[in-house]
Image (spheres, rainbow, N blue to C red):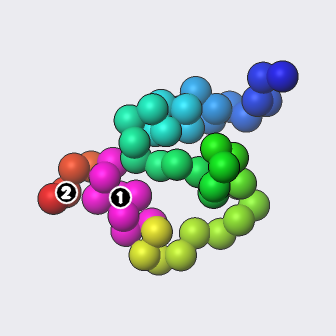
Amino acid sequence: MACPSLFADWIEELSAEGITAGCGGGNYCPSTPNSRGQMAVFLVKTFQLM
């Protein structure tokens, strides 16, 4: 079954590029909040800040 999210293609691309691995087990959990540290890593990887 295809994911109904408008952002599914972007999420899959972020996973393919190794920027995010989801919330574990290959799952994506949009209702689970991110910590400040997790968001920092996400931004550094996404925008190649290091």
Is residue 2 shown left or right of residue 33? right
Residue 36, x across and y down, in percent: 47, 77
Is residue 15 shown left or right of residue 27? left
Q: Main secondary structure of the magenta part?
A: helix
Residue 32, x across and y down, in percent: 71, 65
Q: Regarding mark 2 in the picture, which secondary structure is present there?
A: loop
Amino acid bearing label 1: Leu
Is residue 28 shown left or right of residue 17? right
Q: Residues within 10 Å of mark 1 (few under 14, many from 20)?
A: few
Pick the quarter of the image with the C terminus. bottom left
For label 2, the residue is 49
Is residue 35 shown left or right of residue 30? left
Measuring 49% from the left and 39% from the top, which residue is drawn there? 15
Query: Looking at the rendering, which quadrant does residue 18 occupy?
Result: top left
Q: Regarding mark 1 in the picture, which secondary structure is present there?
A: helix
For label 1, the residue is 43
Residue 46, x across and y down, in percent: 33, 48
- Inter-mark Cα distance, 2 to 1: 8 Å
Closer-to-camera residue (1/40): 1
Is residue 2 depicted above or below 44 in this figure?
Answer: above
Q: Is residue 14 magenta?
A: no
Closer-to-camera residue (5/50): 50
Instruction: Residue 10: give its label.
Output: none
**2 or 1: tag closer to the N-terminus:** 1
Point out the stretch of residues depicted in magenta: 39-46
Whether residues under marks 2 and 1 lie with C-beta atoms below 8 angstroms apart, the answer is: yes
Amino acid bearing label 2: Leu
Query: Looking at the rendering, which quadrant does residue 2 occupy?
Result: top right
Is residue 20 depicted above or below 17 in this figure?
Answer: below
Q: Is residue 45 magenta?
A: yes
Measuring 71% from the left and 54% from the top, which residue is drawn there? 29
